[in-house]
Image (cartoon, rainbow, N blue to C red):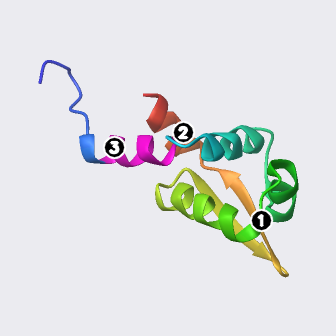
Amino acid sequence: MATAVRLDTTRAAALFHALSDPIRLDVVMLLLDGERCVCDLMSDLGMAQSRLSWHLKTLADAGIITARRDGRWNYYTLDADTLAETRD
């Protein structure tokens, strides 16, 4: 490979797969403004929790978002390090 830094293609594929869906990109865009409750994401996207949960899990599995639980709701945040890794 001609580049100075060897690209981890498996990791890159996982990140780009997670970002390859318009709904997941919408979630990322909504989270650019900061932490959001899943209830707000459902409302903003006009989507049932069951369908949104699958997309959130895909983003979380790739490390793009993190979640914290508060009562009955999960709150999601972008992982800045993973976004920087994706950009690089």
Q: Which residue is mark 2?
A: 83
**Range of residues picked out in magenta:** 11-19
Question: Can you say whether 85 is above or below 37 in the image?
Answer: above
Question: Gap between marks 3 and 2, in whole Å?
Answer: 14 Å
The reply, left or right, for residue 83 in relation to residue 10 is right
Looking at the image, which residue is at 85% across and 49% down? 44
Disc 3: which residue? 13
Tags 1 and 2 touching, CB below 8 Å: no
Q: Is 73 situated left or right of 23 in this image? A: right
Q: Main secondary structure of the magenta part?
A: helix
Label 1 SS: loop
Identify residue for label 1. Answer: 48
CA–CA distance between discs 1 and 2? 26 Å
Q: Is residue 10 above or below residue 57?
A: above
Locate the C terminus and report the quarter of the image it occupies.
Answer: top left
Front residue of 24/35: it is 24
Q: Nearer the viewer, mark 1 or mark 3?
A: 1
